[in-house]
Image (cartoon, rainbow, N blue to C red):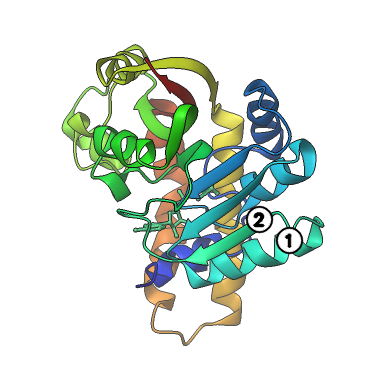
Amino acid sequence: MELPRIFTIRERNHRIHNPFTPEKFATLGAALRLPAGSTVLDLASGSGEMLCTWAREHGFTGTGVDISTLFTEQARARAVELGVADRVAFVHDDAAGYVSDQPVDLAACVGATWIGGGVPGTVELLTRSLRPGGMMLVGEPYWRRAVPDEETARACLASGSADFLLLPELIEQFGDLGCDVVEMVLADQDSWDRYQAAQWLTMRRWLDANPDDEMAGEIRIELTVEPARYARYQREYLGWGVFALMRR
Ligand SMILES: C[S@@+](CC[C@H](N)C(=O)[O-])C[C@H]1O[C@@H](n2cnc3c(N)ncnc32)[C@H](O)[C@@H]1O
């Protein structure tokens, strides 16, 4: 049970493993208008930045679950650094099927809906941990504009255009699942750059330090082709946002 190494090579210096900035997470945390003491379950919590900063800023308590050993260690270290280690815990585990012992006020899956087999399954999974009247957060890509062909979709790292919806359609899908969309904060191209472009320097530094590693060839190719691919396709076509949902 471990995240493939390619991700930890690319994102080892990231605090946020999504096209979000600290400012966008701060905006979202305030927008939810939840009281101090609110309990949170964060499935696929990465390096724990959302949970740790919200514990500090809003007095939330909670648990993050992630399959990456490195990211989980980083999350625990961040909790100590921000002085919230008594309020948050990070569990190294598979989040697929993970349900909290006690119902929580806020159940989140920000950027990993594959753990529920897609958006509907993830909403269902989060609902199982949620107290009645609680709130869910789902982070999910969408098409900023319709892709002209399947090749473009694949160049956005989708398996095809059907992987994602346009933003209004994604919002309607949440409605079809019986949820009100009560808030959203969206990535923009600058916040995408903080996620994607920040990986290029990390890869370059890693390559310089690890020229004989078995993954050096793969990382070399990626660093060569990735910036133009990203600029040509993903930056133009792929949106991403976090949607706050409440069951109707
Ligand atoms: C796009 S990142 C998002 C991380 C975090 N939510 C954030 O915003 O920084 C996806 C995360 O999902 C984790 N992950 C992937 N598959 C998982 C699984 N089956 N169970 C738990 N975590 C998983 C990865 O380790 C990674 O941290």
* Quadrant of the image where one finds ligand 1: bottom left
In the rendered image, the vertical position of residue 6 relative to residue 104, given as above or below: below
How far, Cα to Cα, is label 1 from label 2? 6 Å
Where does label 1 land, which residue? 85
Q: Answer whether residue 130 is visible to the viewer in this image.
A: yes
Which quarter of the rendered picture does the N terminus lie within? Answer: bottom left
Where does label 2 land, which residue? 88
The percent coordinates of residue 32 (x first, y second) are 62, 24
In the rendered image, the vertical position of residue 236 relative to residue 196, given as above or below: above
Q: Label 1 CB, ligand 1: below 8 Å?
A: no
The percent coordinates of residue 61 (x first, y second) are 66, 47
CB-based contact (under 8 Å), mark 1 and mark 2: yes
* Amino acid tagged 2: Val
Q: Which mark is residue 154?
A: none
Q: Residue at the location (48% across, 48% down)?
A: 102
In the picture as drawn, the residue positioned furthest to the bottom comes out as 212
